[in-house]
Image (cartoon, rainbow, N blue to C red):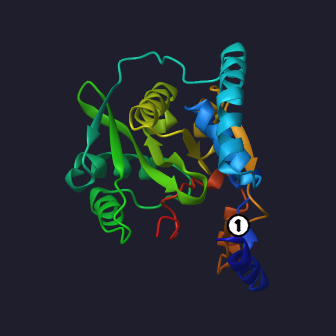
């Protein structure tokens, strides 16, 4: 929820999802000059000053990233990633989700082919979602979804990682999907890659890139369980697999 709506939900006894990290965005800067420029504009500086700051501060930010080793890592393993149109998501997604749903003790949004096609192709805003499929020996073992968002007031293009789901949260699969998301960010001319949510097993792979962070204002990821036994189960942090496909975040 946005902050005003979160206060209303709180009044009706909604509780924060028990994962403190969920309120923090992680992001990787792919275009330091434009990132500095937009950051200065956010402070209310005129366009000319922001542009000059970008040309001066961008190389310094890039140098800092090189020194610290920020950025994608080359993964290991025999995993191939390919792009698939959202309206061509097939039954191999059903097999992946059904196996994972049967073996996980987590609250999962249904991620079968029908649900994913409905959500990614039925967006009333007409967003161009990119679906990346990871395969091992031809079998689907994971996927990621990203889309580019133009921030008008800042003149800034950002890529949002909407969802990522891998069999058993396999590190090599997650790494390959993150590498593909970074490659898409660069090739599409986007200035940064951003994610929010995800369980610790997935976030930890992204954190290997030493991403930058920004908090959200207050608790905006909330739930209310109608039954006591369910509430007790959902108070465990490991019970949640939350991404931007949950709830109405995308809409």
Side of 164 where 98 appears, left or right: left
Q: Is residue 145 visible?
A: yes
How many circles with numbers are drawn on the protein?
1
Residue at 52% in and 69% down? 247
Can you name the residue that lies furthest to the front here?
48
> Where 161 sits versus 184, above or below?
below
Q: Is residue 200 visible?
A: no
User: Which residue carries the number 1 mark?
Assistant: 220
> Where 19 sits versus 211, above or below?
below
Q: Secondary structure at mark 1?
A: loop
Residue at 34% in and 54% down? 128
Which quarter shows the N terminus? bottom right
Q: Nearer the viewer, residue 33 or 107?
A: 33
> Where 222 sits versus 112, above or below?
below
* Rendered image quadrant of residue 228: bottom right
* Rendered image quadrant of residue 59: top right
Side of 123 where 20 appears, left or right: right
Indicate the position of residue 234 as horizontal and vertical percent values.
Answer: 67, 63
Q: Residues within 10 Å of mark 1 (few under 14, many from 20)?
A: many
Indicate the position of residue 96 as horizontal and vertical percent values.
Answer: 34, 45
Indicate the position of residue 112 as horizontal and vertical percent values.
Answer: 32, 57
Q: Nearer the viewer, residue 127 or 162?
A: 127
Indicate the position of residue 223 as horizontal and vertical percent values.
Answer: 66, 71
Residue at 27% in and 62% down? 114
Residue at 43% in and 51% down? 102
Side of 79 where 216 appears, left or right: right
């Amino acid at each position: 929820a946005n902050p005003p709506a979160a206060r209303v939900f709180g009044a009706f006894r909604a509780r924060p999802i028990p994962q403190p990290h969920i309120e923090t965005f992680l992001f990787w800067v792919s275009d330091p000059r434009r990132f500095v420029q937009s950051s200065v504009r956010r402070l209310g500086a005129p366009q000319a000053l922001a542009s000059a700051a970008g040309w001066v501060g961008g190389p310094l930010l890039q140098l800092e990233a090189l020194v610290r080793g920020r950025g994608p890592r080359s993964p290991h393993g025999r995993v191939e990633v390919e792009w698939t149109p959202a309206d061509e998501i097939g039954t191999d997604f059903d097999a992946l989700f059904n196996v994972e749903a049967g073996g996980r003790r987590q609250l999962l949004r249904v991620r079968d082919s029908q649900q994913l096609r409905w959500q990614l192709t039925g967006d009333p805003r007409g967003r161009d979602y990119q679906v990346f499929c990871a395969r091992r020996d031809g079998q689907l073992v994971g996927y990621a979804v990203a889309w580019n968002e133009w921030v008008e007031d800042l003149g800034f293009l950002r890529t949002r990682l909407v969802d990522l789901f891998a069999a058993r949260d396999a590190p090599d699969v997650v790494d390959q999907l993150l590498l593909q998301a970074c490659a898409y960010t660069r090739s599409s001319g986007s200035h940064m890659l951003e994610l929010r949510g995800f369980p610790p097993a997935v976030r930890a792979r992204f954190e290997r890139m030493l991403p930058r962070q920004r908090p959200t204002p207050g608790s905006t990821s909330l739930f209310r369980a109608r039954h006591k036994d369910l509430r007790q189960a959902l108070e465990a942090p490991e019970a949640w697999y939350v991404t931007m496909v949950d709830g109405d975040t995308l809409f």
